[in-house]
Amino acid sequence: MIEHRPFASLGKANFGWLNANHHFSFGHYRNTARDSWGKLRVWNDDEIAAGKGFDPHPHRDMEIITYVREGAITHQDSLGNEGRTEAGDVQVMSAGSGVVHAEYNKEKVTTRLFQIWIETDERGAKPSWGAKAFPKTTREGGFEVLASGRPEDAAGDALHINANAAVMATTLKKGQTLTQLFSPGRAAYLVPATGAVTVNGVALQARDGAAIRDEREIAITAQEDAELVLVEIAA
């Protein structure tokens, strides 16, 4: 089953400095049909104005992954971590027993990012933060695992999260097809950051969502050059 969620159907919130689009219930947007997808709880498509950002606020017991699409985001937290994550790269915060953090766009241009929350498998764990550069050239034509808590990724280069889930990304050239397999009991959520694709024949435009379940295999064909982000979780 592949459920197409057009960008126009997402929850909307515009605060001037922040233009947010919610794939799942978040803030003032409530849609009981879109509360979560497996353990995937939040996928926000955020545009943050230059010089603006999220002031310090708390989280706990959630794995929060930020995929920067354009610009950069600067992170600060109560653990003493600080770092700048640029377009194409990823940061991960395991909120665990509790952490206060801030996220600012200190650039002179709008920052565009995906903010992804996955329910943790380790409630009350020690909180942590990390970031890593992932050159897009290494993911052409195949999904690269960016953040994961799946056992099969333990020895890889992905950032660690405390959940049996994985965040992946790829780029495809127009006309290129990529086949992705899923184990039984797994689900996925796919968003083209840019470009247009078909997924088992279902057409997706940039920033649409595809909620995938009970599919052992999907074939993704690029109708134009595309950049894709995929989250795989327990169904």
Image (tube, rainbow, N blue to C red):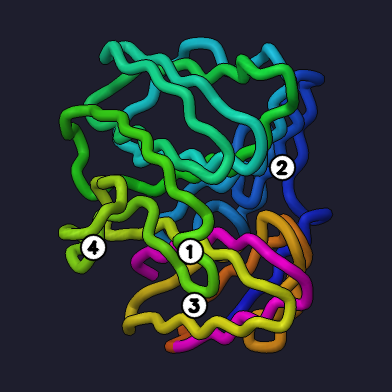
**Residue 110 screen position, x and y as percent:** 74, 27
Marks 4 and 1, how far apart in space?
Answer: 16 Å
* Amino acid, disc 3: Arg
Q: Is 44 rendered above or below residue 225? A: above
**Residue 154 screen position, x and y as percent:** 18, 58
Q: Specify whether residue 233 is painted magenta.
A: yes
Quadrant in the picture for the C terminus: bottom left
* Amino acid, disc 1: Arg
- Callout 4 secondary element: helix
Which label was assigned to residue 139? 1
Tell me the residue that label 4 is attached to: 153
- Callout 2 secondary element: strand
The residue sitting at 41% across, 15% down in the picture is: 76
Q: Specify whether residue 82 is painted magenta.
A: no
Q: Earlier in the sequence, mark 2 or mark 3?
A: 2
The residue sitting at 65% across, 19% down in the picture is: 107
Q: Is residue 27 visible?
A: yes
Tell me the residue that label 2 is attached to: 21
Residue range (magenta): 217-235
Marks 1 and 2, how far apart in space?
Answer: 26 Å
